[in-house]
Image (cartoon, rainbow, N blue to C red):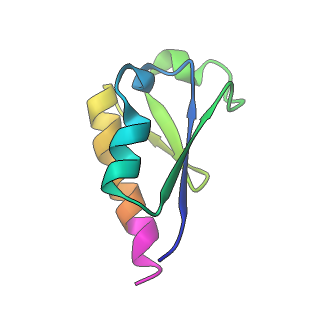
Amino acid sequence: MGIVVVEICDGNAITTIDIESILEKEFPEVAVLMNECLSFCGLCAVRPYALVNNKRVFGKTPEECLDKIRLQIKEELAVYE
């Protein structure tokens, strides 16, 4: 199985949910990295987002963003099936 890296800025609204434990429990092949800053200045203040293997994933709410992250993870893992 492949490895998928999800990077999250610790100032992002998505951190209102425990995204790290949620994703790592659902997808053992995923590593969630919490970063101080992902250098997309101001983006974390606008809406929840994350990088999934360096691809930006956005949502209007943390829950919507989490759902989109899950879909992107599944697409990334499909490469290794």
Residue 79 at x, y percent in the picture: 46, 79
- Residue 43 placement, left or right of 1: right
Q: Is residue 44 above or below residue 21?
A: above
Q: Is residue 79 magenta?
A: yes
Closer to us: 54 or 46: 54
Residue at the image point whose x is 35% and y is 37% from the top: 65
Residue 25 at x, y percent in the picture: 34, 50
Residue 62 at x, y percent in the picture: 33, 28
> Where's the C terminus, which quadrant?
bottom left
Residue at the image point whose x is 47% and y is 81% from the top: 80
In magenta, the rendered stretch is 75-81
Residue 7 at x, y percent in the picture: 57, 42
What is the residue that sits farthest to the bottom in this orientation?
81
- The quarter of the picture where residue 10 lies is top right
- The quarter of the picture where residue 61 lies is top left
| Viewer can see residue 52 | yes
| Viewer can see residue 60 | no
